[in-house]
Amino acid sequence: MSEKDIQRYKVAIIGLGPGGIGAALKLHEQNIPFIIFEKSTPGGKVNVAPRVDNYPGYKMIPGPELAMELYQRIVDAQIKVTFKEVTSLTKTDDIFTLFTQDGQAYEADFVIIGSGTKEKKIGLDKEEELLGKGISYCSICDGHFYKDLPVAVIGGGNAALKEAIHLSEIVSHLYLIHRRNEFRGQTNFVNELKAKENVEILTPYVPVEIEGDDFVQGLKIQNRETGEIKNLKIDGLFPLVGQDPNTSFVKIDGVLDEYKTIPVNLRTMETNCHNLFAIGDCLPRLIRQIYLAEHDGIVAANTIISRMK
Ligand SMILES: Cc1cc2nc3c(=O)[nH]c(=O)nc-3n(C[C@H](O)[C@H](O)[C@H](O)COP(=O)(O)OP(=O)(O)OC[C@H]3O[C@@H](n4cnc5c(N)ncnc54)[C@H](O)[C@@H]3O)c2cc1C
């Protein structure tokens, strides 16, 4: 690719989740020119949150509705979104180079990474093969396929508990499988599930085999204390056992930690690399929330604005 083909920007933002949206609105407010990339759906993971109970200003709001409201702010501000996947990010001297999946190169003086996470795999045979054929990581997107059918949710955090609550309203029977007897998620969600007649909580169990050739037909689980095996007849399986960061495109040494998350200075959101910032869920943190991602985006944008003055 020749020099003239490279598009040059002051700032590049990767990801249009709450983090990227927070950063974009702040930069826009100060008339800083930037480009923002999104590979999939504006609003990021908020689109798959069945319900958001802790976003200041709302008692409860369905995730897709909040995602749409966040994106509307971008639309109203007439911010152009580049709907492309960033496939590589490098730095030479003081300039960052980003490539998108179509081979286009972009350069920027500052980069903000707000690329979030993807669901962790449970690591069983057939997990990839049966994705979309009974296996799903999103009840909001796929829950309706399992109306009046039995399903299983695997996991013990808030995301798994909320998915289970949402799915229990649709399916005939829901098994909630967790490897420990205690749940990491909120007690009120656990209690809500315990009170439901069509929910069966199975702990301390781990999944050992997914059954079915063309479609999920069952799940074999094993009790971690007694070794007892149970064969569950299910049509849908929702594994929600954690997240892996979307950071494989980062090709700059020393930016990622051993878990591929991006440590930052929390006062500036700057990474180990000068003028490279990271925000939201791709950071190493225990709590991943919408308002934290937005906060990070605003802090990163503010740091950039102050460096430009
Ligand atoms: C089921 C569920 C329920 C939840 N419930 C709540 C809740 O009630 N309250 C709450 O506060 N939080 C909740 N969360 C967490 C919340 O959704 C996240 O903390 C928040 O969305 C993180 O924002 P982010 O901008 O860091 O990342 P994301 O929202 O993940 O956005 C990242 C964006 O980057 C894009 N992207 C990734 N890689 C690239 C690339 N290479 N090129 C271009 N674009 C890229 C992705 O497509 C995505 O749109 C929930 C999450 C889940 C899964």
Image (cartoon, rainbow, N blue to C red):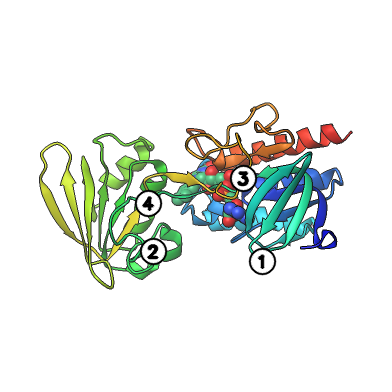
Quick one: label 2, few (<14), some, or many (20+) residues within 10 Å?
A: many
Q: Which residue is mark 1?
A: 102
* Distance CA(mark 3)–CA(mark 2): 37 Å
Amino acid bearing label 4: Lys
Amino acid bearing label 2: Gly
Question: What is the secondary structure assignment of the residue under circle 3?
Answer: loop
Give the mark toward the camera: 1 or 4: 1
Q: Which residue is mark 4?
A: 121
Quick one: label 1, few (<14), some, or many (20+) residues within 10 Å?
A: few
Amino acid bearing label 3: Lys
In-front residue for pair 224/48:
224
Quick one: label 3, few (<14), some, or many (20+) residues within 10 Å?
A: some
Which one is earlier in the sequence, the residue at label 1 or at label 4?
1
- Which quadrant of the rendered structure holds the N terminus? bottom right
* Distance CA(mark 3)–CA(mark 4): 24 Å
Q: Name the mark on residue 143.
A: 2
Tell me if residue 169 can be seen. Answer: yes
Q: Outermost residue toward the right?
A: 309
